[in-house]
Amino acid sequence: MVHLAVPPVTSGLAVGSLVAGIAAILVALLVGCLGAAANSVGGAWAAGAFALLGVLVGAGAVVAGLLGLRQIRRPPAPPAVHFAGRGLALAGISCGAAGVVLNLLGLAVGLLVTYA
């Protein structure tokens, strides 16, 4: 029996993780801006809502990145597709974690500005 060589395919989980991680960082920038202007815009509530969104997206990026790494590490059977994209998955995990931390910091700044 002959098995044809199948080229590696980039993992969709890894790409999705990177996109979600970048989105979490962008939302963190919005949370920071709303948190800094909390008194004038009533931004503590808005910063809290966007921080929740950013934390959920960042956590989703971390989970998708870990699942993508698992998918990439799994050895394929000969006719199966081999997945690539380890760097994308690692970048998605790190961007997602950074997005979670930055969102929580932006929320903390908003609460300090509002209630201090």
Image: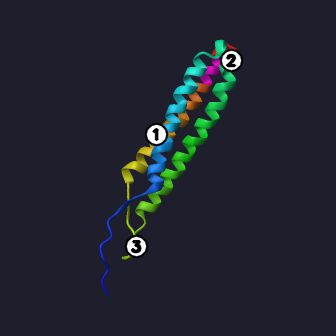
* Mark 2–mark 1 distance (CA, rounded to whole Å): 28 Å
Instruction: Indicate which disc, 3 or 1, sits on the residue closer to the N terminus.
Output: 3
In the rendered structure, which amino acid carries the disc numbered 1?
A: Cys
Question: Which one is nearer the viewer's eye here, 12 or 89?
Answer: 12
As for residue 111 lying within the magenta part, the answer is yes
As for residue 110 lying within the magenta part, the answer is yes
Residue at image mark 2: 42
Determine whether, in the image, residue 97 is placed left or right of residue 85. right
Instruction: Indicate which disc, 2 or 1, sits on the residue closer to the N terminus.
Output: 2
Assign a secondary structure to mark 2.
loop
Residue at 41% over, 44% down: 91
Could you say where residue 10 lies in the image, as x and y percent from the top left? 39, 57
In the rendered structure, which amino acid carries the disc numbered 3?
A: Ala
Residue at image mark 3: 80
Q: Are marks 3 and 1 in contact (CB under 8 Å)?
A: no
Could you say where residue 90 lies in the image, as x and y percent from the top left? 42, 48
Where on the picture, by quarter, is residue 40? top right
Residue mark closest to the camera, 3 vs 1? 3
Instruction: Indicate which disc, 2 or 3, sits on the residue closer to the N terminus.
Output: 2
Tell me the number on the disc at residue 95: 1
Residue at 30% over, 76% down: 4
Determine whether, in the image, residue 20 is placed left or right of residue 78. right
In the rendered structure, which amino acid carries the disc numbered 2?
A: Gly
Q: Find the magenta span and give its range.
A: 108-112
* Mark 2–mark 3 distance (CA, rounded to whole Å): 54 Å
Residue mark closest to the camera, 2 vs 1? 2
Q: Is residue 81 above or below residue 87?
A: below
Sort mark 1 into few (<14), some (14-19) or many (20+) by Cα contacts within 10 Å.
many
Query: Hey, which residue is sitting farthest bottom in the picture?
Result: 1
